[in-house]
């Protein structure tokens, strides 16, 4: 059964088409792997009965030659995506045992194309976090460990369950969301491939909202090809989401293996941070050399407003969060803690239902939107955002096809190691990723090497709006040069 779970989506798709095995066999192998890996805490809800029923239905379709592009492929779904008749909590106590009567657009498209749901994956509460330690279900454990150490490491966040499950071979791919790096950072920490599409490329309908102008759904997979296969099913126009863009969805998989000769790759000087580990710097140079060897041209570029991105992000995102999370009041659904008045009931419910990090961000967001502070903070942050976007536009106008940067400032760290006394320490993990969300651009994180302790490190490629295909072509070059890594099994 091990070989059934160690295949890529592309390999499994061929095996299913050739009738080498059935979707039910593939699903059963993954369900057994999930059961054996509960120490990772990647899944917050397993749905074995639903998975087997979906697999049987797909097997019947495959037999008739009617299977879709993802026919029979078992996937994990981040607990931020509403799944009809299956509990969806955003990993927050405030949603309690909420069971949506509807399906998110992204997941409905995956089921339309024949995918199988194994269960719901752990994430930071309301996607607020960079380490998957804020979930009400407890932290996710990274399947990777430092050489010679048993210390439990974080898988990154907020899509830590998605990254951990894909890296540990518990599912063939997973849905994830990215507001400030929540797909790319966990992908880098677990040696998986994570894609944050252009804002508006994938529908946000039916995904629990954190910061509506920044959130974007995308895939986490084992290879760039697998990510491209998933992305094609996840993307597309949705009239139910007013920010969804009405553009044809290209065949992303066709971009894999395409020549990158003559492409201009920008290397931004502002991403060379003081105190950046030498191994991250070295990996960045290696990645640039691999792209150059494949025929790309390297050019130094400047993104002068980069230094303002993190502070501006941590004003815009909490402001939108405070507005989005106002709906969780104990009245309509989820947790309700009674009080002597409706005001007290609101207070009690929100105090008990939200965790520390969510409360912190809601308070920051409410403050920056309040009378007297709106202009000083929120409005100014939005102006900075415009300048960040313009920095990228200027580079692309000069013929730059994509930008190469590190994905994270370090490899995975231990659970409980960061952010305890100073939350800002945790926020600094997003330093290379938030600019992409602020500008609404696509980004991909690809495994590119390991640090001195044997932990994976990733490189990030940032593309022009709606040019994910170039990122897949370039990401494949890095992947081929670096090779693929899998964690040694200990769980």
Image: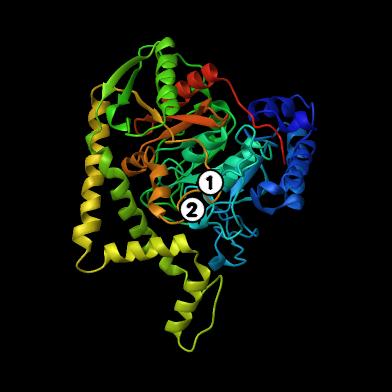
Residue at 57% x, 58% y is 102
Q: Residue 352: image x %, image y %?
A: 52, 72
Residue at 45% x, 60% y is 357
Please say which color scheme the image uses: rainbow
Residue at 27% x, 40% y is 307
Q: Residue 234: image x %, image y %?
A: 52, 40
Q: In which quarter of the image is the N terminus?
A: top right
- Asked which quadrant contains residue 376, the reply is bottom left
For the residue carrying disc 2, how many other residues have a C-alpha within 10 Å: few (<14), some (14-19), or many (20+)? many
Q: Residue 129: image x %, image y %?
A: 47, 52
Would residue 483 appear left or right of 318 to someone viewing this image?
A: right
Note whether 73 is above or below 278 in the view shown.
below
Q: Which residue matches tag 2? A: 127
Secondary structure beneath dot 1 equals loop
For the residue carrying disc 1, how many other residues have a C-alpha within 10 Å: few (<14), some (14-19), or many (20+)? many
Numbered badge on residue 159: 1
Q: Which one is nearer the viewer's eye here, 88 or 363?
A: 363
CB atoms of marks 2 and 1 within 8 Å: yes
Q: Quadrant of the C terminus?
A: top right
Residue 42 appears anywhere in the view:
yes
Would residue 14 appear left or right of 178 to someone viewing this image?
A: right
Secondary structure beneath dot 2 equals helix
Q: Residue 311: image x %, image y %?
A: 29, 49
Q: Which residue lies furthest to the front in this view?
A: 148
């Amino acid at each position: 059964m091990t070989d059934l779970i160690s295949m890529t989506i592309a390999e499994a798709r061929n095996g299913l088409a050739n009738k080498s095995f059935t979707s039910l066999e593939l699903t059963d192998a993954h369900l057994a792997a999930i059961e054996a890996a509960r120490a990772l805490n990647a899944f917050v809800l397993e749905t074995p009965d639903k998975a087997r029923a979906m697999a049987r239905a797909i097997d019947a379709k495959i037999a008739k030659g009617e299977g879709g592009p993802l026919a029979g492929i078992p996937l994990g779904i981040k607990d931020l995506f509403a799944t009809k008749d299956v509990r969806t909590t955003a990993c927050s106590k405030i949603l309690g045992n909420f069971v949506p009567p509807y399906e998110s657009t992204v997941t409905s498209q995956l089921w339309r194309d024949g995918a199988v749901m194994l269960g719901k994956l752990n994430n930071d509460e309301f996607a607020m976090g960079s380490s998957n330690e804020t979930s009400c279900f407890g932290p996710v454990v990274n399947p990777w460990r430092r050489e010679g150490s048993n210390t439990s490491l974080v898988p990154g966040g907020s899509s830590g369950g998605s990254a951990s499950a894909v890296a540990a071979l518990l599912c063939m791919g997973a849905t994830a969301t990215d507001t400030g790096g929540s797909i790319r950072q966990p992908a880098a920490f677990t040696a998986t491939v994570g894609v944050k599409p252009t804002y508006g490329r994938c529908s946000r309908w039916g995904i629990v909202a954190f910061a509506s102008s920044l959130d974007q759904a995308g895939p986490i997979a084992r290879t760039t090809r697998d990510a491209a296969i998933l992305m094609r099913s996840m993307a597309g126009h949705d009239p139910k989401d007013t920010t969804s863009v009405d553009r044809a969805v290209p065949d992303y998989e066709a971009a894999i293996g395409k020549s990158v000769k003559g492409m201009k790759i920008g290397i931004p000087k502002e991403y060379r941070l003081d105190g950046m580990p030498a191994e991250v710097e070295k990996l960045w140079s290696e990645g640039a050399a691999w792209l150059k060897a494949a025929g790309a041209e390297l050019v130094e570029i400047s993104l002068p407003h980069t230094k303002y991105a993190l502070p501006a992000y941590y004003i815009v995102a909490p402001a939108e969060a405070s507005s989005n999370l106002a709906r969780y009041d104990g009245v309509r659904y989820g947790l309700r803690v009674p009080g002597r008045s409706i005001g007290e009931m609101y207070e009690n419910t929100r105090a008990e239902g939200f965790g520390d990090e969510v409360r912190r961000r809601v308070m920051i967001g409410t403050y920056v939107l309040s009378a007297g502070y709106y202009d000083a903070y929120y409005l100014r942050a939005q102006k900075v955002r415009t300048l960040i976007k313009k920095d990228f536009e200027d580079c692309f106008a000069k013929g730059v096809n994509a930008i190469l940067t590190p994905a994270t400032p370090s490899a995975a760290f231990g659970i409980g190691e960061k952010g305890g006394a100073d939350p800002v320490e945790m926020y600094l993990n997003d330093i290379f990723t938030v600019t992409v969300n602020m500008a609404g651009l696509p980004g991909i994180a690809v495994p590119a090497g390991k640090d001195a302790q044997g932990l994976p490190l990733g490189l990030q490629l940032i593309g022009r709006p709606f040019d994910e295909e170039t990122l897949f072509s370039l990401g494949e070059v890095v992947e081929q040069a670096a090779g693929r890594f899998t964690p040694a099994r200990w769980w």
